[in-house]
Amino acid sequence: MNQLKRNAALFFTGLMLSAAPVAVSHAADKPTLAFVVNVASDFWKAAEAGVKKAQGEMPDYNMELKYPEQGSVAIQQRLMEDLVSAGVKGIMVSAVDPKTQTDGLNKIGSQTALFTTDSDAPKTNRIAYIGSSNVDAGKQAAEIAKKAMPDGGKCLGFVGLLGADNARERIEGMKGGLEGTKIELIDVRGDDGDQTRAKKNVEDALVASPDVTCMVGFYSYNTPRIYEALREAGKLGQITVVGFDDDPITLGGVKEGTIAATVVQQPFEWAYQGMKLMAAYLKGDKSGVPANGLIIIPTVIIGKDDVDKYAANLKAMAGK
């Protein structure tokens, strides 16, 4: 618990100053740094605020956060190539599918300073990864499930991009954390970033898998879609829900007790620290890049008793 409080304190000290989108005009005499996400989601609003804070502290740079039109490898690659063609000096990217993007990411990395976040691509020429340990986050999800289901049960997971490292590692971490228990993660359904499909996956599972006693939302929008589908089916409170991230619906469910708890990340810090790291690197200061290329920002479990304090701190950091 002390470690949880220390991690939570770290989280609260660095979070949102603003959730306004970042709009930066290009100036010919200023190098541009870009933060490229994997799929459009409210989850990235905190990263927008992190970019904005870094921009305010480093006015000699242009800083932008970019959303691909779709959560696909081809569209994300095209976006990064367009940024490189426009002269961007550094890109931090949450790779859609690192296993199939190796050549494309290496191409970008050969033309500009390439960093990864959220979903790593360790087999590429990226300089460093800054983000969560998704394996550890998965283990925390297992801890939530074990506390909520001491007698065991069958869990079904839902995620956006099954091929992304952040998804694979969270699933791996949760399965590892459940070893030796009577709880099993029997399957994970992907939706490719389509939130309508994400909800339908849950609705279909309620019909096809009536023996499932637990559902896990591995991406930020998956837990709210689980909540909505269960509410409409009259099954809220009957199926244990394990969440990720801090969508308002998720936090509301945690507070009312229909979601067991949620594992929250720090995209604000990924963006804020990442932009500063890229800027320093481009100036020749490589001291911020560790030998293993990994900069881990801890995840935190938020349960029912933590929600009010967590939400209050979010508002305070956002200046609301």
Image (spheres, rainbow, N blue to C red):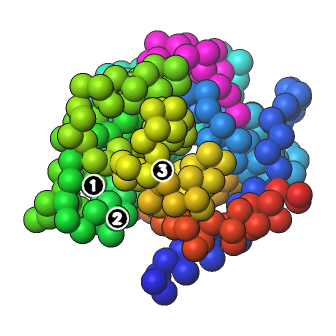
- Please identify, in this view, whether the residue under mark 2 or under mark 3 is nearer the observer: 2
What residue sits 88% from the left and 28% below the top?
Answer: 25
Sequence-first tag of 2 and 3: 2
The residue tagged 2 is: 148
The residue tagged 3 is: 244
Asked if residue 18 is positioned above or below residue 125 in the image, the reply reads below
Outermost residue toward the left in this view: 180
Sequence-first tag of 1 and 3: 1
What residue sits 29% from the left and 26% below the top?
Answer: 207
Q: Is residue 163 visible?
A: no
Residue 29 screen position, x and y as percent: 87, 32
Sequence-first tag of 2 and 1: 2
Mark 1–mark 3 Cα distance, whole angstroms, equals 13 Å
- Please identify, in this view, whether the residue under mark 2 or under mark 1 is nearer the observer: 2
Residue type beneath disc 1: Gly
Asked if residue 162 is positioned above or below residue 192 in the image, the reply reads below
Residue type beneath disc 2: Ala
Q: Is residue 188 magenta?
A: no
Residue 164 placement: quadrant: top left
Query: In the rendered view, does 25 fall on the left or right side of 97?
Result: right
Residue 318 screen position, x and y as percent: 82, 56
Residue 33 placement: quadrant: top right
The magenta span reads 65-84
Contact (Cβ within 8 Å) of mark 2 with mark 3: no
Dominant SS in magenta = helix
